């Protein structure tokens, strides 16, 4: 029986070919489908997760040598009570996603960036995010959300949850 350390838990992945990419195990074995398959060849960043805090492309990482490594997926970012991280909240406030497909990977890369560099320049942001492609071209909003999360800009708050609740009442 093989196990992985994912989002602070030890999870059983059964008997599995050690060459299987981590992405397949996350999605197909463990049902952690927030991490997306985009290209499968390390070109798009949709499959980005953290391995010991570093952003990696899970489509390229064989699952065989990971039993003692700390893996974090998009499902593991928010607190146990559902409290969002600053990055996640900024993504909502800045209304970043369009189709949303690339966004888990974008958030994982942005989270790793701000942990290492809490006050990134535009060049730092571009460098950290260059491996995450977005077919919907949300790049301007991604950059703005990172700056909001870093405290460099105030939130735009396109989406007002309280107002939306009021409209439905
Ligand atoms: S699916 Fe892994 S980089 Fe595209
Ligand atoms: S939001 Fe559609 S691919 Fe990025």
Image (spheres, rainbow, N blue to C red):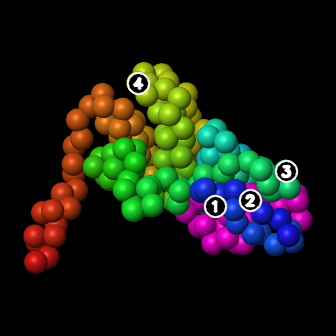
- The residue sitting at 55% across, 50% down in the picture is 105
Q: Nearer the viewer, residue 45 or 28?
A: 28
With 14 as the anchor, is 40 left or right in this view?
left
Residue 117, x across and y down, in percent: 49, 26
Residue 9 is tagged as: 1
Residue that label 4 marks: 119
Report how far apart the C-alphas of labels 1 and 3 lie in the structure: 17 Å
SS of the residue under disc 3: helix
Looking at the image, residue 101 lies above or below residue 151? below
Occupied quadrant, residue 4: bottom right
Residue 141 is tagged as: none
**Label 2 vs 1, first from the N-terminus:** 2
Residue that label 3 marks: 65
Q: Nearer the viewer, mark 2 or mark 4?
A: 2
Residue that label 2 marks: 4
SS of the residue under disc 2: strand
User: Magenta span covers which residues?
Assistant: 17-35
């Amino acid at each position: 029986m093989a196990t992985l350390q994912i989002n602070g838990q030890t999870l059983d992945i059964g008997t599995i070919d050690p060459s299987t990419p981590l992405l397949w195990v996350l999605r197909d074995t463990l049902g952690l489908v927030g991490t997306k398959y985009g290209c499968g060849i390390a070109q798009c960043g949709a499959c980005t997760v953290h391995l010991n805090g570093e952003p990696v492309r899970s489509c390229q990482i064989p699952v065989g040598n990971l039993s003692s490594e700390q893996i974090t997926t998009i499902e593991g970012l928010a607190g146990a009570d559902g409290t969002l991280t600053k990055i996640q909240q900024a993504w909502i406030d800045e209304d970043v996603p369009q189709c949303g497909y690339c966004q888990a990977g974008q958030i994982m890369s942005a989270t790793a960036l701000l942990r290492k560099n809490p006050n990134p320049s535009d060049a730092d942001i571009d460098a950290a995010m260059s491996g995450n492609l977005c077919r919907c071209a949300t790049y301007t909003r991604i950059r703005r959300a990172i700056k909001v999360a870093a405290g460099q800009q105030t939130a735009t708050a396109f989406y007002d949850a309280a107002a939306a609740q009021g409209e439905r009442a």
